[in-house]
Amino acid sequence: MFLARMNMAGLRPDHDVLDIGCGVGRVARYLCAYLYPSVRYEGFDVMDAAIAWCQENITPAHPNFGFTATPVLNTAYRTDPSLPDAATFRFPYDDASFDFVCAQSVFTHLLPESAENYVREMARVLRPGGISCTTWLWFNDSGYSHPFTEPMERHDTYAVLNPEIPEAAIAYQEDAMRKMFGTGGLVIDGEYPGYERIQDLCVAHKP
């Protein structure tokens, strides 16, 4: 399903791809048969075990697929206070390295300063004309709210499911998300509401 959404966003088999929050290769395993062997795929995740599995099971068969463990502080997944802060984390890749950046169910676990930083970092690593394809949980002043946001505790521009573990699930006011992209250096091309367990989708590009 997400690969179809990526294709809709403009993914091509000759694109160099960055997969933020790649987990155990939930997107990578499908891209192995889609991307040309000559292009580069990179995925990173805060969970060491997930990255180790990808390195052991995907990279040997597909050497153009690289995976990097990037442990950062998160109240839901990595609670060690000595870890780097996601709000200042720099993606471990050079400027203008990728044609396509995807993040499935990543911004749903980032507080505002971290989300803003990740949007800036996406813009930094994308080449001009590059595409970002990211999922969110939205609510807005026009009456729309993703069904998953209904029980959430709302703040000014975002809402959390569990105040004691805020990064377990986070939703954003749609205008706040738009502002993040605008100030972060990306232009939104399309916003697509989700349903039930399917998150809202934002497609943008780097001018």
Image: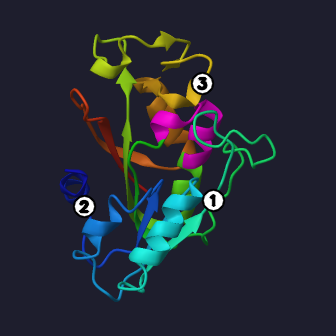
Q: Looking at the image, is mark 2 or mark 3 earlier in the sequence?
A: 2
Q: CA distance from mark 1 to mark 2?
A: 27 Å
Residue highlighted by disc 1: 70
Question: Which residue is found at the position 56% from the left and 13% from the top?
Answer: 156
Amino acid type, callout 3: Ile
Q: Would you say the magenta stretch is mainly helix, strand or loop?
A: helix
Across and down, in percent, residue 67 comes to: 51, 70
Measured along the vertical axis of the image, is residue 133 above or below residue 127?
above
Could one spot residue 10 in this view of the protein? yes
Q: Secondary structure at mark 1?
A: loop
Of the residues under marks 1 and 2, which one precedes in the sequence?
2
Q: Which circle, 2 or 3, is nearer the viewer? A: 3
Alpha-carbon neighbours of circle 3 within 10 Å: few (<14), some, or many (≥20)? few
Residue farthest along the right direction in this orientation = 82
Left or right, residue 36 beside residue 97: left
Please, what is the three-letter code of the amino acid marked with disc 1? Answer: Thr
Specify the quadrant of the image occupied by residue 163: top right
Amino acid at dot 2: Gly
Query: Which residue is drawn at the image coordinates 40% and 25% (left, top)?
Result: 174
Q: Which residues are magenta?
A: 107-118
State which quadrant residue 3 falls in.
bottom left
Q: Residue at x 24, y 71 (%)?
A: 12
According to the image, label 3 marks what residue?
165
Q: Quick one: 98 or 81, which is closer to the camera?
A: 81
Left or right placement of residue 174 versus residue 10 in this view: right
- Image marks 1 and 2: residues in contact by CB distance under 8 Å: no
Of badges 1 and 2, the one in the foreground is 1
